[in-house]
Amino acid sequence: MSTYRDRVDAGRRLAGRVGPLLADRDPVVLGLPRGGVPVAAEVARDLDAPLDVVVVRKLGVPFQPELAMGALGEGGALVVAEGIVRSARVTAAEFDEVAARARAEVERRARVLRPGARVPLRGRTVLLVDDGIATGSTVRAACAVVRAEGAARVVVAVPVCAADTARILRREVDELVCLQEPDRFAAVGDYYHDFRQISDEEVVTLLSRAAHGAPEAAAVAVSETVEIDADGVLLVGRLEVPAHPLGTVVFAHGSGSSRHSPRNRQVAAALHRTRLATVLVDLLTLEEEPDRDRVFDVALLAGGLAAVGRWARAVPPCRGLPMGYFGASTGAAAALWAAAEDPEVAAVVSRGGRPDLAGARLGSVWAPTLLIVGGRDTAVLALNRRALAELRCVRRLAIVPGATHLFEEPGALARVSTLACDWFAQTLAPAGAPAR
């Protein structure tokens, strides 16, 4: 059934249909995050139009979250599928609880994806683009958002839309452009060969490219080598801070690695695009590194990491920002150990980690913790499964299929970066940081 190779392919085909209709209307193109943005980027490029996002959130039925009972958008715009609410027997209290969570997530994602104000919409033709439409609740909420902001004309463009939903939408929008309207429609993903999840960092990158007219690396406002006093021992690190950072992530690398690790630097670059500052630091001195006992001395590593964490929270570019740890291998054990002793640590991510080396302190970690393990790293995967059971905080185990311990397989480290960016974006955003 697959029709489109991926979202870029779908966007290019959609642009061919939309271009002749809107080329002379000076439109603003708004993608629905996350999946609609790669499609919208191709359309905006073809129209030479500004690209932005409109953040909306599906409201899933409590006991069947994949079934939409409505949607909520920026500014409080709300669309309710009354028929589904009635048939699913959702109470007012249950609906309000789902809506409250969605509202917090909409606000968080808007801050992460759009550093400043949205492109002005008043009096403009607004083109809303998604990768496909099933029930229409999400796009209808988006329409409500843009009409509230003064859009003069609202056009919806998608590669595929369920036929019955398309008939409803044509009565509610000024124009619907749809390449396919199948009567028998199960899921949007059925029409794509590649329908992988899109990360926040990819959305931010696409918006940045559109704004500047070319691909670019993450903009870093501060980039400097630093020396950090850890109880009389000078540790060397690299501080990099993007403009308007939302938080700080301190890296703890594993045995045999250093602050120059290409794997950690790739993850750090992705975090910069998510507006997170990073500190990549060597927790051992040059004299200590050859000593294998020190390499596996988790208490020593955790003490150094805690000192770096205190420094990171106080250094001017990052002062007052929420902070998390990213640990790899033995560095993950140090991150969990240090987090257990510091209630100000807001999140932990472990890549191919040895959380078992944190021992009894696992039960004292309160910071939300993500454990990322390669699917083929079977021994470490077993250790992480046991650690997951010992943790008492909000936690998740994410398995990267086909990946081994170092995530050297094609696309494996990119998946790690996406998972880490999403986790830190959820937990370090100022209004979204969890309370103890």
Image (tube, rainbow, N blue to C red):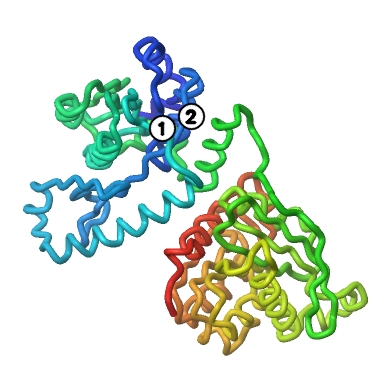
Return the residue nearer the eye: 311 or 21: 311
Above or below, 361 relative to 87: below
Quarter the N terminus occupies: top left
Residue 257 seen in the figure? no
Outermost bottom residue: 360
Residue 135 % position (x, y): 21, 39
Residue at x 57%, y 89% (from the top left corner): 360
The three-letter code of the residue at mark 2 reads Ala
Return the residue nearer the eye: 126 or 139: 126
Above or below, 213 relative to 207: above
Residue 222 % position (x, y): 72, 54
Mark 2, secondary structure of its residue: helix
Q: Which residue does the numbered mark 1 point to in the structure image?
A: 192
Residue at x 68%, y 79% (from the top left corner): 306
The three-letter code of the residue at mark 1 reads Tyr
Residue 185 % position (x, y): 24, 33
Return the residue nearer the eye: 224 or 37: 224
Residue 430 left/right relative to 413 = left
Residue at x 36%, y 33% (from the top left corner): 130
Using a 10 Å C-alpha cutoff, classify the residue at mark 2 as few (fewer than 14 neighbours), some (14 to 19) or many (20 or more).
many
Q: Which residue does the numbered mark 2 point to in the structure image?
A: 41
Residue at x 47%, y 36% (from the top left corner): 194
Residue 288 % position (x, y): 88, 78
Of circles 1 and 2, the one toward us is 2
